Amino acid sequence: MNPAEAYIISQPEPFRGMLLHLQMVIESTIPEVDLKYKYRIPFYYIGDKPYCYLNQSKDYVDVGFWNAAHLTKNLEFMTTASRKMMKSLRYRFLEEINDEILVEVLFDAYSVRDKKFYK
């Protein structure tokens, strides 16, 4: 088991279930992603470029997007949470995860994967 998978499995419920669900949706939507352990969290890469990350913090799970400055879809569901460039979909319960919105954002992020971090 790689460190990113160990991170996911080691989280308490309900976060472990949420992270496993998000992992399944991400990997089935964008099959070319590679799950790594960077910055002490699970981080998906496409080739050598960061794509998105999973982070459990306090009472929520974030799916953060590396090229968030270029995203255009479902921004009303995303939070910046005092971050200047990063945006994320934030979930407190498994039932809050709307797979349709998540998949649209994943495809949007995939479409801007070759753009620079900043606009």
Image: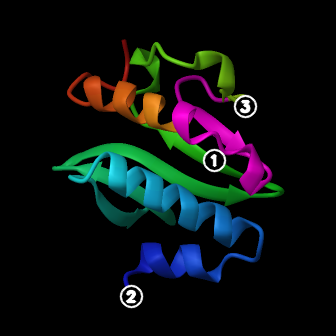
Give the residue type that dot 1 points to. Answer: Asp
Up-down relation of residue 83 to residue 118 (above or below) = below
Residue beneath disc 1: 62
Q: Name the image quarter holding residue 14.
A: bottom right
Report the disc number at residue 1.
Answer: 2
Q: Position of residue 73 (x, y in %)?
A: 49, 17
Q: Is residue 75 above or below residue 12?
A: above
Do the residues under discs 1 and 3 have CB atoms within 8 angstroms?
yes
Residue in the picture at 76% in, 50% down? 95
What kind of element bears circle 2?
loop
- Residue drawn at 44 percent across, 72 percent down: 4
Where residue 6 appears, as percent x and y from the top left, is 50, 82
Task: Please say whether residue 94 is one of the residues in the magenta stretch.
Answer: yes
Task: Name, please, the residue furthest toward the right.
Answer: 59
Please name which of the two marks, 2 or 3, marks the residue nearer to the observer: 2
Q: Which residues are magenta?
A: 83-101
Upstream in sequence: badge 1 or badge 3: 1
- Which numbered marker is on residue 81? 3
